[in-house]
Image (cartoon, rainbow, N blue to C red):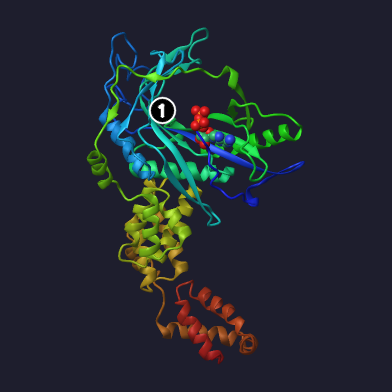
Amino acid sequence: MTIVDTRTPDPKKFIMGATGEWEIVIGMEVHAQVTSEAKLFSGASTSFGNDPNANVSLVDAAMPGMLPVINEECVRQAIRTGLGLKAEINLKSVFDRKNYFYPDLPQGYQISQFKQPIVGEGIILLEMKDGEKVEVGVERLHLEQDAGKSLHDQHPTMSFVDLNRSGVALMEIVSKPDIRCADEAKAYLTKLRTILRYLGTCDGNMDQGSMRADVNVSVRRPGGEFGTRCEIKNVNSIRFVGQAIEYEARRQVGILEDGGEIVQETRLFDANKGETRSMRSKEEAHDYRYFPDPDLLPLEFTQEFVDELAANLPELPDEKKARFINDYGVTTYDAEILTSELRFANFFEKVAKGRDAKLSANWVINELFGRLNKEGIALANTPVSADQLGAIVDLIKNGTISGKIAKDLFEIVWTEGGDPAVIVEERGMKQVTDLGAIEAAVDEILAANPDKAEQAKEKPGMLGWFVGQVMKASKGKANPQAVSDLLKAKIGLE
Ligand code: ADP
Ligand code: MG
């Protein structure tokens, strides 16, 4: 393929070598397991965690004479994914045989798509932490079969093969070399996973192998010619992708600065050592002898079929984010967090519905998500429901409790559960807005500190200290605004 450089070199992303600055260039090939009941060309189940070889049909075991039959649901999922990546959908594509020998590949070839993939060029938008927007081009998406798995740790002298994965549908999503640093690569994977999960076309669980990344890395002088790349195979976590890139880029810079050359090769990332090492060089690379699979007709469908799928696509992360910013007035940063997972977004909307959206966002993100994170609990298992959190927001908003008491209330709901309004009533947590009661406390503090009250006339900044004292005396239940107003009047400010 001819590569077009779409990015302007950005010094923030350069790495420093002994002889000057270098720019990293990254392209990713992501394998995403298609969410479907059955495999790409057989009716066997795709469920994870079953006994070895429990999900194997005669087709998956490549018994002689078996013929593949395309699973229409997998085709739909690939098209939906393409639409989610704003990509060109090819109404005609071709399945090819990719030939190689391996014990976990009983057919002796993988059915894949080579020259004519089902999905062409698309785009993934990234929003970095500092607000920078990055566009990463998608080169193509094609459908292919997964292979089985060799098990070397089950027996002292034998290896076994588990064909449960054999024939499971994968989407290979290939990016253009538009990524320029480890953080962008991590953001790319995160965003791609979010899109796949919103679409329901891949569960994105990297720890179960449903999504894995081959990371292509090269280095060059800023803005110069593209360098020779190395491909780091099958990295299975987003964090490892970042580590692998950092290590690999340094390794290549070291070689080039010593006057050496990068050999194009396939490498492995060793997560324990945090380094990449050579797996095979280009000379050892397979010659796959691709040719169209004679058992399968070209895959053809109509534009109406695509339009129908497009019409039923769910709201995607970028659109949802824009809507949250627009309709709820939350910040871009908050919108990014809230839409990073569909479950987050739905939870937030349940809390924010008919309420102060910014206050809701604050409580969802800072109090609830912060706490869940700290305790390592998934939102699915949250002890504080959207209704309970919404009730807390209501109590703050209508002045029943102060922000400080709200945190105590949150703690009670988190540990004991219950209806927040009832808890506030029963435990006497209501904010005191009764001016008489507040005034008594204010008078008391002022009488106890006549010199400070005098100083405060000159230094209005001391007001905060008085407010604090009154709040403390009321055990946090006084309405801080009322306290502040009363203090100002009594001290003679304004
Ligand atoms: P293959 O791995 O089959 O040879 P491609 O040439 O299409 O396939 O490239 C695979 C991946 O490598 C793509 O994601 C592409 O963006 C990336 N890539 C290509 N050239 C470079 C480069 N010089 N540096 C980093 N990544 C690259
Ligand atoms: Mg490759």
Residue nearest the viewer, comparing 89 with 442? 89
**Residue at 28%, 45% in the rendered image:** 310
- Residue 102, given in percent of the width and then of the height, sits at 47, 14
In the rendered picture of this protein, how many numbered marks are placed on residues?
A: 1
Vertical side of 252 occupied by 11: above or below? below
Left or right: where 20 falls relative to 448: right
Q: Residues within 10 Å of mark 1 (few under 14, many from 20)?
A: some
What is the residue that sits farthest to the front in this orientation?
A: 2
**Residue at 31%, 8% in the rendered image:** 64
Residue hosting label 1: 115
Left or right: where 404 falls relative to 327: right
Vertical side of 440 occupied by 165: above or below? above
- Residue 296, given in percent of the width and then of the height, sits at 29, 20
Vertical side of 101 occupied by 473: above or below? below
Residue nearest the viewer, comparing 344 with 58? 58
Residue nearest the viewer, comparing 51 with 412? 51
- Residue 84, given in percent of the width and then of the height, sits at 36, 44
Q: Could you say whether the residue bearing mark 1 is in a helix, strand or loop? A: loop
- Residue 95, given in percent of the width and then of the height, sits at 35, 24
Kindly tell me whether mark 1's CB lies below 8 Å from ligand 1: no
> Given the image, on which type of amino acid does mark 1 rest?
Lys
Q: Quadrant of the C terminus?
A: bottom right
| Picture quadrant where residue 219 is located | top right
Residue nearest the viewer, comparing 59 with 3? 3
Can residue 384 be seen in the rendering of this structure? no
